[in-house]
Image: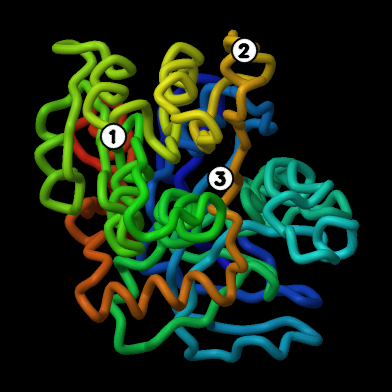
């Protein structure tokens, strides 16, 4: 079928819309009419080739929409279902089998190869194959093909055009707190970088009862929103040293910290802000090969650092839970969102990079 899709054709290039051809769903695949797709930092860093995704390619991995058709063997969803699209895993490696799908040993091949695992593509342009299957969806488009495994059925009463970011960015921030770090009520956390992912972590920390939630960011408007969403304290590194400030206000450091920027110097601050036995979660994306310097003594005396992918989430459980929390008014991630027509995707990306919008959602 003919569809409209946003394409990136060169490193650091601009997104542009064009007509492309999309094949019918094969075995295990699901055809979705997209109603909204969030722009995630991962789309931008893959455009810049932090991760070497083959170009030209159709990106987009925070899609939401309505199932139009299913391929052979699909039983999880049916035409008419409302769905959120998320990451894909192989389902067969040791990590998948033990319930750690975000750490699938073939995570790169399943999500960043630009092709199906069998080396084919369902997309073509002007009769030539086009890279896609980004996070097994490529949802910067009017329609997308996903696999039933990374398709999550959601409540039809929820605003479908809003829900796409739950598939990656919002899931990552909230899940880092609720699934990975799991602070107890009354404990403390510092979130370094409060874009859409960091603010999702702030909301989650508020939900689970953290007594002290410290937001660190350079943009005053983001810090103000962080306070509205549950932060008890805010720090602008332009005004004060965050490590010294956090150590002083907590009497020794926070129980948990989250690094959401991908900057090595900020990761060092996030680790140094911990109390002994504190845990730093790393969710910011940096170019492959980026290194960080840490104080060995600081780690030796009980601090720890761990990477977190996709919020340690069980997709089919956690995404519907976030939808329900939103419907109850307890997880108001709609406050982060601004909508754009798909044909204005380049403007949406520029506004995201400039910090003028926290979570852009493009709608066909």
Q: Can residue 259 be seen in this view?
A: yes
The residue mark sitting in front, 3 or 2, is: 2
User: How far apart are the two marked residues, 2 and 1, measured between alpha carbons?
Assistant: 38 Å
Which percent across, then down, holds residue 249?
22, 28
Q: Are marks 2 and 1 in contact (CB under 8 Å)?
A: no
User: Could you classify mark 2 by the number of other residues whose Cα lies within 10 Å: few (under 14), some (14-19), or many (20 or more)?
Assistant: few
Q: Give the residue number, with chain letter if any, for mark 2.
A: 297
Q: Which of marks 3 and 1 is in front?
A: 1
Whether residue 296 is situated above or below residue 15 in the rendered picture: above
For the C terminus, the quadrant is bottom left
For the residues carrying marks 2 and 1, which lies nearer the camera in this image?
A: 2
Residue drawn at the location 86% of the way across and 49% of the way down: 119
Relative horizontal placement of residue 300, taking residue 172 as reference (left or right): right
Give the camera-side residue of 295 and 58. 295
Using a 10 Å C-alpha cutoff, classify the residue at mark 3 as few (fewer than 14 neighbours), some (14 to 19) or many (20 or more).
many
The span from disc 3 to disc 1 (Cα, nearest Å) is 19 Å
Residue 62 at least partly seen: no
Residue 36 placement (x, y as % from top left): 36, 63
Image location of residue 261, percent across then percent down? 42, 27
Side of 62 where 104 appears, left or right: right
Question: On the picture, is 41 further left or further right than 31?
Answer: left
Along the polypeptide, which appears first: circle 3 or circle 2? 3
Q: Mark 3 points at which residue?
A: 58
Callout 3 secondary element = loop
Left or right of 204 in this view: 259: right
Work out whether 353 lies above or below 113.
above
Q: Name the residue under label 1.
A: 352
Q: Who's the residue at 58% across and 61% down the image?
A: 313
Q: Quadrant of the N terminus?
A: bottom right
The answer to whether the residues at label 3 and label 1 have Cβ atoms under 8 Å apart is no
Tell me which residue sits at (57%, 17%) in the image.
298
Looking at the picture, how far across and down is residue 357, in whole percent? 21, 39
């Amino acid at each position: 079928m003919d569809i409209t899709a946003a394409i990136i054709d060169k490193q650091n290039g601009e997104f542009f819309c064009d007509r492309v051809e999309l094949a019918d769903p094969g075995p295990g695949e699901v055809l979705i009419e997209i109603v909204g797709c969030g722009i995630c930092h991962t789309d931008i860093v893959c455009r810049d080739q932090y991760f070497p995704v083959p170009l030209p390619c159709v990106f987009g991995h925070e899609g939401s929409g309505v199932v139009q058709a299913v391929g052979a063997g699909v039983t999880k969803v049916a035409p008419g279902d409302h769905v959120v699209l998320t990451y894909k895993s192989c389902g067969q490696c040791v990590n998948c089998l033990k319930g750690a799908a975000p750490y699938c040993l073939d995570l790169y091949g399943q999500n960043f190869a630009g092709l199906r695992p069998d080396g084919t593509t369902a997309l073509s342009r002007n009769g030539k194959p086009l890279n896609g299957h980004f996070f097994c969806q490529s949802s910067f488009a009017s329609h997308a093909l996903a696999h039933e495994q990374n398709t999550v059925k959601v409540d039809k009463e929820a605003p479908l055009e809003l829900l796409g970011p739950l598939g990656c960015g919002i899931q990552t921030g909230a899940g880092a707190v609720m699934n990975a770090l799991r602070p107890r009520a009354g404990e403390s956390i510092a979130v370094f970088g409060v874009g859409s992912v960091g603010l999702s972590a702030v909301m989650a920390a508020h939900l689970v009862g953290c007594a002290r939630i410290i937001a660190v960011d350079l943009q005053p408007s983001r810090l103000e929103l962080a306070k509205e969403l549950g932060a008890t304290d805010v720090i602008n590194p332009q005004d004060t040293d965050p490590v010294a400030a956090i150590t002083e206000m907590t009497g020794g450091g926070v129980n948990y910290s989250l690094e959401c920027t991908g900057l090595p110097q900020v990761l060092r601050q996030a680790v140094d802000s911990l109390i002994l036995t504190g845990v730093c979660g790393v969710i910011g994306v940096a170019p492959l090969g980026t290194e960080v310097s840490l104080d060995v003594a600081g780690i030796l005396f009980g601090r720890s650092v761990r990477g977190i992918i996709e919020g340690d989430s069980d997709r089919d459980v956690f995404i519907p839970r976030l939808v329900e929390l939103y419907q109850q008014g307890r997880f108001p991630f709609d406050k982060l969102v601004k909508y754009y027509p798909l044909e204005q995707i380049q403007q949406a990306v520029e506004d995201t990079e400039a910090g003028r919008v926290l979570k852009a959602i493009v709608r066909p």
